[in-house]
Image (tube, rainbow, N blue to C red):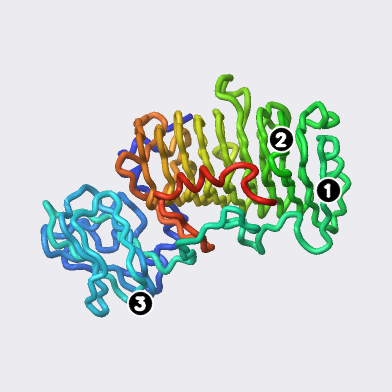
Amino acid sequence: MKFGRIFRISLLNTALAISAVAQANNLALTGPGAGADGSSKVSGSSYGDVKDGNLQSYWQPASNNGQRVSVKWSSAVTASQVVLREQGSNVTSWRLVNHDNGAVLASGTGIGSSRTVNFNPVSTKKLNLEILTASSAPRIAEFEVYGNAANPVEPGPVNACASSPQGYASLNGGTTGGAGSNAVTVTVSTGSQLVSALNNRDVNRPLTIRVNGTITPGNSGGASKFDIKDMNNVSIIGVGNNALLDGIGIKIWRANNVIIRNLRIRYVNIGDKDAITIEGPARNIWIDHNEIYNRLNVDKDFYDELISGKKDIDNVTISYNYLHDSWKTSLWGSNDSDNYNRRITFHHNHWHKVNSRLPLFRFGQGHIYNNYYNDIQDTGINSRMGATIRIENNLFENAKNPIVSFYSNNIGYWDTRGNSFSNVTWQENPGSGIIAGPNVQPTAVLNLPYSFNLLPTNQVKAHVLANAGVNKCSF
C-alpha cells in the first residue's frame, strides 16, 4: 500500500476532510445564491473560505472577541443543522443566530475540529456565527449548513420481526423476495434439492425456498455454492432452528429482490469462501436474522467473509444477524478500484469475537445503527476510498479501534451520532491511516432517503442479544 499522498498532510487536516457526498447536501455551497460576509478579516483571509469545501483555507477575523462570519442566500432556505470546523481550538464562546429575526438558535463554549449543531428547522436568508470570545484570533475553516433531513428518526417502537426491511432495502419499491401474487413455496432438506429449486424455478412467479435440514457439500451434488444468479424475487428462509448450511455458502449474482433469513451458515471454505456474497449488478437485497460464523483458531485466510458485496450493488439491508468468530467479516468493495455508489444499511446486528471488517466499506454510503459490538480484536468499522458512513447509536464494548480509515490511498468519512464506547482501546497507526478516537467527532454529514426507528443507545445491548440470530421470529 502507498500512503504517502495522504500522510504528507497533517493528521488534523486528514481527520477533518469532508466528503463529496456530504458537501452535495451543504446549503452553504448549493443553496440559492450562496454567499458569505462578516465583521472583519485579516489579510489573505476571505469570508468565502468558510464555504469553499476546503479545510486548508479559513476565515480569520482581525481580533479575538465580538466577531462574526455569516452564510447567506438570495432566497430563503430551510436549515436544521450546522457543522462548524475550526483549525485549532481558539474559540471559547460562540452563538448561532438567525439573522432574519435575531433568534439565537444555539450557543456553546468551544468549536474545535468539528462541532455539529442541531436545532428546530428555520426558514432564513442568513445565518450568523458570532464569536463572543476566543483565546486568540480564531480560524474558522468551514460553516456548513444542512436542511431538513429527508429521514425523520422515529423513536420507536422497534419491530424485530418485521415483514419488510428498514434502511436502503426499503427503497426502489421495497424488498419482498419470494412473496407476492402467484408465489411458489418449496421446502428442501439437501443441497441437491436447493440447487434444483433454484435452477427449475418459474421465472414468472416469486419463489420461497424453505430450508429444513443440514445442507453440506456432500449432499449438494457437487455444487461449491448456491447461486441465486440471473433471477429476481427469491427468498431462502430457514425453518425454525433446523436450517444449517455447513461448509457451503450462497452467492447472489446479477439478481434483484432477494431475501435470506433465519439460516445458520458456518465454516465456508469452498466456492467463493464467503458465507453470503453479493456481486453486482444487484438491487434490493435483505439479509436478516441469520447466524454466520467461522473459527478464529485457523489462519486468517483459511476462510473469507461472512457477508460481503462487490461491484454495482445498491439498496441492501443487513439486519438482526449474529456474526461471530471470524477473521474477515464483512467486506464491501473488493479493492480500491471497485468504485460504485453502494448503499448499505446495517442495523441491530451482534458482532462478537471478530477480528476486523465490521464492515470494511469502500466508496458509497453506509448507515450503521443500533448494532452491538463486543470483543473486537483489531479494527471495527473501516471507512475507505471516500465512503461516507453514518454510525449511529451503536454500542462498542471490549473493542480495539472501533472506527478507522486504514489501508487505502484515500480515506473514508464518518457521521458519528450517539454511540457508546466501553473498555475501548484506540491505537494510532499513522502508517496505515487514521483513527476516529478517543475524542470521536464526525467528519461528514450523511442525510438519508428513508425514515427509520432508532433505539436509545442504552437499550441496544439487551435488544440485540434478545433478537439477533436464528429462531427468533415465526417466519
Contact flag, marks 3 and 1 (Cβ < 8 Å): no
- Dot 1: few (<14), some (14–19), or many (≥20) neighbours within 10 Å? some
Image coords of residue 411 (percent x, y): 44, 41
> Which residue lies under the disc numbered 2?
244
Q: Quadrant of residue 265?
A: top right
Q: How crowded is mark 3: few (under 14 residues within 10 Å), some or many (20 or more)?
A: some
The kind of residue tagged 1 is: Val
In space, the residues marked 2 and 3 are separated at their CA atoms by 55 Å
Q: Is mark 2 on a helix, strand or loop?
A: strand
N-terminal label among 2 and 1: 1
**Residue at point 81%, 37% (across, down):** 189
Q: Does residue 21 appear left or right of residue 203 in this picture?
A: left
Label 3 or label 1, whichever comes before in sequence order: 3
Q: 362 or 69, which lies in front?
A: 362
Up the image or down, 357 lies above or below 121; here it is above
Relative depth, front residue between 167 and 348: 348
Circle 1 — which element? strand
Q: Where is residue 381 in the image (x, y as percent from the top left)?
A: 47, 40
Q: Name the residue under label 3.
A: 123
Q: Residue at x 66, y 54 (%)?
A: 284
Q: Name the residue under label 1.
A: 186
In space, the residues marked 2 and 1 are separated at their CA atoms by 17 Å
